[in-house]
Amino acid sequence: MSTTDTAAPALKEIFNAERLQHIADEMSAVYPAFKVKAFLKHANQGLAELSVMQRMARVSESLHAVLPLGYEDSLEVLFELAPRLNSGFVSMCLPNYVASYGGHAFDTSMEALKYFTTFGSSEFAIRHFLRSDLERSLELMHDWALDENHHVRRLASEGSRPRLPWSFRLEAVQANPNLAAGILDRLKADESLYVRKSVANHLNDVTKEHPGWVLDVIEGWSLEEKHTAWIAKHALRSLIKQGDMRALAVIGAGKKAEVELVDVRVEPGVVRLGDAIGLSFSVKSTVAHEQRLVIDYAIDYVKANGGVSRKVFKLKVVDLVGFGEVVVGRRQVIKDFTTRKHFGGVHGVWVMVNGEVLGGAEFTIVG
């Protein structure tokens, strides 16, 4: 059985029969009239065939199906349920409830999302309100960017990401990143790493359509502030992998590297799926002054049609002293993922320094 076969069901099992029973028990504790059997019957129907996100939605649907209350009264019960749930991810069924049944009550629903996000995240649910009432939602999220709770501040950035994984794209923000720019500006030096990661991911999303816009924004920041500098580096990671000279310059590596590549090796030269390759090499300075170097490597993966698709991997950023040398090594297991399937053939491995390919080696995947 492959790694993919075992990993996907494990994620689905966040919402398994035992977890559904837990939700039912906790609902009974806060709302004694709760119809446990009806909830479990509704929630468990066809559960095995549902993805993790479909299971999350099923919980919301099942709660709605058996709660004989209006929307606002149901929220009062769910507010009491939220801190009793034993998983942050599971608690995301509550903001999903808001997205599914609260579209008619904007103010009430947005306050509910703000509350529920402190237990898991309302990042998926809030996008439904952004899609239906963008201006009003962004105005409120702009205020949330100054909230004392870091979960709420993160929601302002994460919920407005144009390309949030596992969700639909926000086409308006994707087309015009200025719409959420004020939120990001308020968070550009946030003390919370949780928030900073979100801001960096939001900006990295934007680089897919508007790399120049992101670079203009970041070049206008004061990168002497350590939190801001951290965001800038991680926001530009895709452009740095592509060897974009403006992005490299932001992190102090915008000049052509004056180095030589020594003894590049990929061992073993022949592997099967599940085996590991070891990449090793040295980078030696050819000048007397110190240089900041961004060292990456790329693999040209063979595709089903015999062509190749290049994937760049991060290695390290080093400040190499004059005439100094740095030895680099990396081990990588060759296995299939949901996003990448391997095919037999010769795979090139290329060492990149400051965006420039300096040399490489190869390995072959067989049987």
Image (cartoon, rainbow, N blue to C red):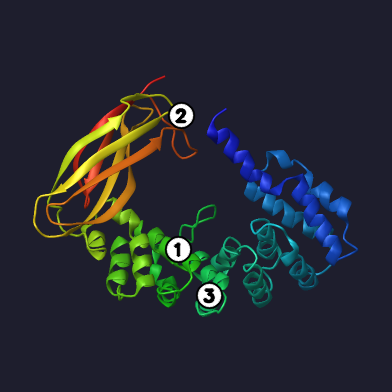
Rounded to the nearest whole Å, what is the CA distance between mark 2 and mark 3? 45 Å
Residue 340 vertical position relative to residue 114 in the rendered view, above or below: above
Sequence order check, earlier mark of 1 and 2:
1
* Residue shown at 39% from the left, 71% from the top: 227
The image quadrant that residue 311 belongs to is top left
Residue visible at 27% across and 51% down in the picture: 242
Q: CA distance from mark 1 to mark 3?
A: 17 Å
Q: Nearer the viewer, residue 83 or 101?
A: 83
Which percent across, then down, holds residue 273? 44, 27
Whole-percent x, y for residue 332 in the image: 39, 37
Q: Residues within 10 Å of mark 2 (few under 14, many from 20)?
A: few
Give the structural element (helix, strand or loop) at label 1.
helix
Rendering quarter of residue 201: bottom left
Marks 1/2: CA–CA distance? 31 Å
Q: Provide the residue designation for mark 3.
A: 141
Q: Amino acid at mark 2?
A: Gly
Q: Is residue 243 visible?
A: no
Q: Position of residue 41 (x, y in %)?
A: 83, 47
Query: Which amino acid type corresponds to the residue marked 3 in the rendered image?
Result: Met
**Tag 1: Cα neighbours inside 10 Å, few (<14), some, or many (≥20)?**
some
**Dot 3 crowding, Cα within 10 Å, few <14, some 14–19, many 20+:** many
Name the amino acid type tagged 1: Lys
- Identify the residue shown where x is 60% and y is 63%: 121
Q: Residue at x 41, y 24 (%)?
A: 272
In the picture as drawn, the residue positioned furthest to the top comes out as 367
User: Helix or strand or loop: what does disc 2 sit on?
Assistant: loop
Residue 274, labelled with which disc? Answer: 2
The quadrant of the picture occupied by the C terminus is top left
> Number of labelled discs?
3
**Number of the front mark, 2 or 3:** 2
Provide the residue designation for mark 1: 197
Q: Earlier in the sequence, mark 2 or mark 3?
A: 3
